[in-house]
């Protein structure tokens, strides 16, 4: 006789919370001492097609380039070198087609990343990245 009193858990993560948690977990890979940001691109079947975090470009040493936020010379700061999480997620995507995908980001996208998300949409087809989700409040970002 089967045990009908055994039911599934009700307190599991919903998909949006799960993907936001993946974005926050990927942020922990960042070597940046002051800002750790992660991003996760998800298709309409709730499958992850891209993950990224902020860091130095591929092939560049994390130990040789600066991590400072301020300096007299801007070239002595991290800003000319660090790639944002959104850029890395788009560059690392494992699918040529991201039509209908959503991007979950652990921090609201900056203006440059917003443009990149829009441009990635135009490169791979209409409507590819439908929304970004704010890591601060968990709400969908404004339509891009």
Image (cartoon, rainbow, N blue to C red):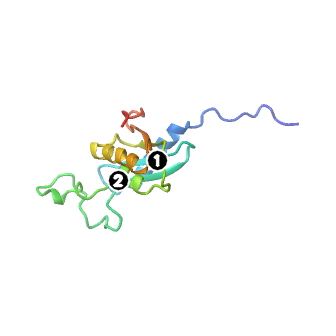
Between 90 and 36, the residue placed more toward the observer is 90
What residue sits right under mark 1 in the picture?
A: 41
Which secondary structure, mark 2? loop
Residue 128 percent coordinates (x, y) = 44, 44
Position of 123 with respect to 14 (left or right) is: left
Q: Left or right: 111 with respect to 2?
A: left
In this picture, is 15 found above or below 72? Answer: above
Q: CA separation, marks 1 and 2?
A: 15 Å
Q: Earlier along the polypeptide chain: callout 1 or callout 2?
A: 1
Residue at the location (47% across, 48% down)?
Answer: 98
Q: Residue 104: horizontal and vertical position, in percent?
A: 43, 42
Q: Is residue 28 visible?
A: no
Residue at x 43%, y 57% (from the top left corner)? 92
Residue 34 seen in the figure: yes
Residue drawn at (29%, 56%) of the image: 82
Q: Position of residue 52 (x, y in %)?
A: 41, 53
Asked if disc 1 and disc 2 are in contact, CB closer than 8 Å, the reply is no
Q: Can you say which quadrant of the picture contains the N terminus? A: top right
Foreground tag (1 vs 2) = 1
Which residue lies most toward the right here?
Answer: 1
Badge 1 marks a residue whose secondary structure is strand
Q: Which residue is mark 2?
A: 54
């Amino acid at each position: 006789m089967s045990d009908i009193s055994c039911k599934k858990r009700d307190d599991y993560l919903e998909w949006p919370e799960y993907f936001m948690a993946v974005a926050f977990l990927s942020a922990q890979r960042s070597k940046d001492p002051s800002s750790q940001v992660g991003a996760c691109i998800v298709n309409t079947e709730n499958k992850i097609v891209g993950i990224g975090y902020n860091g130095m470009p591929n092939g560049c040493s994390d130990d040789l380039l600066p991590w400072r936020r301020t300096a007299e010379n801007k070239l002595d700061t991290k800003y000319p070198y660090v790639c944002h999480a959104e850029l890395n997620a788009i560059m690392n995507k494992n699918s040529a087609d991201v039509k209908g995908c959503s991007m979950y980001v652990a921090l609201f996208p900056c203006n440059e990343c917003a443009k990149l998300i829009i441009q990635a949409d135009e490169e791979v087809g209409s409507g590819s990245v439908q929304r970004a989700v704010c890591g601060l409040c968990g709400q969908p970002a404004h339509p891009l």
